[in-house]
Structure formats: C-alpha cells, structure tokens
Image: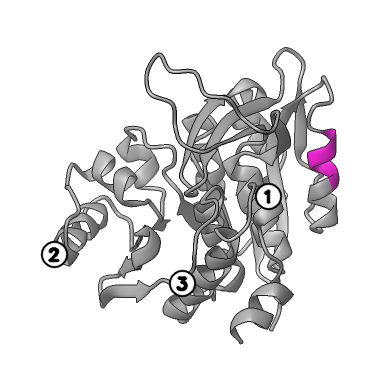
Amino acid sequence: MSKNKVVIVGSTNVDKFINVERFPKPGETLHIDQAQQEFGGGKGANQAIAAGRLEAETTFITKVGKEGNADFIIDDFKEASINTDYILTSENEETGQAFITVTDEGQNTILVYGGANMTLNAEDVNHGEQAIREADFVVAQLEIPIEAIEQAFKIAKAHGVTTILNPAPAIDLPDSLLSLTDIIIPNETEAERLSGISIKNEADMQQTGDYFFERGISTVLITLGEQGTYFATQHESHIVPAYQVKAIDTTAAGDTFIGAFVSRLERDLSNLEDAIRFANQASSLTVQRKGAQASIPTYKEVTAQYQ
C-alpha cells in the first residue's frame, strides 16, 4: 500500500503544562509538585506529527516566530519525516503558545496565545501550492486565520484533492468555508456550536449530519470521546465504538485521531469505517500517556497493540 500524501495547514505552539490534583476554584491557590514543562503543541503540529508517525507522507504549512522557541519542535517534525519546506517565519510575532492545566483524572483546560499562527495568510499558503496540488488530502483546523484555510481548500478543490476540516477550537464559520469542505470532523461541542443542535442521542447526530450535508459537506464524523466516533454519509451512518482504556491525559487525542484517520483513508473513502477504527486505536494509546506530541504513537506501536 502506497503512503497517503497529506498536507496539514495549521498552528504550531509551544505547550506549557502544569499538572494539578484538581482545577482550582475561583480565588483559590493550589500548590503543585512540579514546575511548568514545555512541549511541542498546536493542533496543526499535533496532527502533522500524528500523520507522520503513522506513516503518511506529510507536508506541514505553518508559521512560527523568529525567537527560536519552536526550534525543538521543528526537530521533532523532521524526526517524524515531515516535509518542513513550508514552515514560514513571522518577523513581528512570537511562536504561538498554549498554557495547559491537567488534573490527576486526565481532564484538561487550555488557554492559547495565537502569535505567529494568526499571521498565516493566503499568500503564505500559495507558497505550498505544489504540495497541495499533489496531495491526497488537505487538513486544516481553526487556530489559524480562515483566510489561509479557504485558500488552501480552494487550491485543493481546483485539483480534485479531498479537504478535511477539524473545526476546533469551536467558533462560528462562514458558509464559504463549509462549502469548500468535503469531510468535517468536530467533537460534540464543536458540532453543536456550528449546527445549533445539542447532541444527546444518535437521532441528534443524524440531524447534525443533515445540517452539514445541506452546506455541501459529503462526510461527517463526530468524535464522542469514550463512546467512539459517529460517522454519516449520504448512504450510511452509525457509531464506531472506542477502545476502553484508562485515560491519563486527553490532550492531543483528537489530533491523533485526525492524523491517524487521514493516514489510512483511501482516496475514494472506500475504507471509511476501517480508517475510523484505526484512528480510535491510535487515540486510545495517546490518552494513556502524558503530553501532546510526546503522547502520539507510531504506526508500529498501534499495530503492535491492536493487530
């Protein structure tokens, strides 16, 4: 099987972690056992690392600051065999940063400073046009300007390349972007933000799928955490169950899912359910480890565990 060619257009952050027993209440001070730790992060970078480690031929289009904070992350990209030719540098903004608090139960809160990510524009994306034209899939998230995503998707659509949107973090989106999207992968919160439909059961999921179908999207995946993943096309829909494991840290689980999914998906989507199942397997390993990029498994690790 030849490797999928994947272009990720997205964010690069330096993740700054604090581990706590529980979240503090308003006005409360808690002591911690360990000072802040720094790791590579950003939804785009996480998804690129996941796709690369899971053996997709991956190109990453992103923007970092010139202060050097991202140097160690770029080394990680190269270690994951990611094409870094289209990593650009902002002259005015620092590399993006995320401040993450993780509890002993594995829950997290995340505050993000966009920095250089928010300067990525259509002209920057045009530098990667050849990579996009030659790709099987182009993937984007929402930690970069909509302008950049739309330009990437316009190039992709002009050349028959499948576009995949992970609408995270949750914000309102223009129909102009949704109409350029072939596959959308929100979680329950993001799906509700876009559709206005509160997901309580599978009928709500189907209604949400119909909402996206009406906007020109042909395939809908809704990630449901420990329940698994609901998918819907014009021909079928159901839930692919998750693998039941003890979660230590859910950071990057969704990003691992997307990188794994796109690494295995056939261009004609003929193995959609199998690709989802593989993505669930990869995510189940991620949540059993601490950190973002550090927790993302390799293809060998996933297959050793499940196949």
Nearest the viewer among 183 and 54 is 54
Q: Position of residue 218 (x, y in %)?
A: 33, 63
Is residue 72 on the magenta stretch? Answer: yes
Residue 203 is labelled as 2
Left or right: residue 161 versus residue 222 is right
Q: Position of residue 290 (x, y in %)?
A: 63, 51
Residue 151 is labelled as none
Left or right: residue 254 versus residue 235 is right
Q: Which segment did they paint magenta?
A: 71-75
Asked if labels 1 and 2 touch by Cβ distance under 8 angstroms, the answer is no
Q: Earlier in the sequence, mark 2 or mark 1?
A: 2
Residue 293 is labelled as 1
Of circles 3 and 1, which is in front?
1
Left or right: residue 285 versus residue 220 is right
Which residue is rendered at x = 66% and y = 52% of the image?
A: 48
Residue ID for mark 3 = 276
Give the spatial CA distance, label 2 vs label 1. Answer: 35 Å
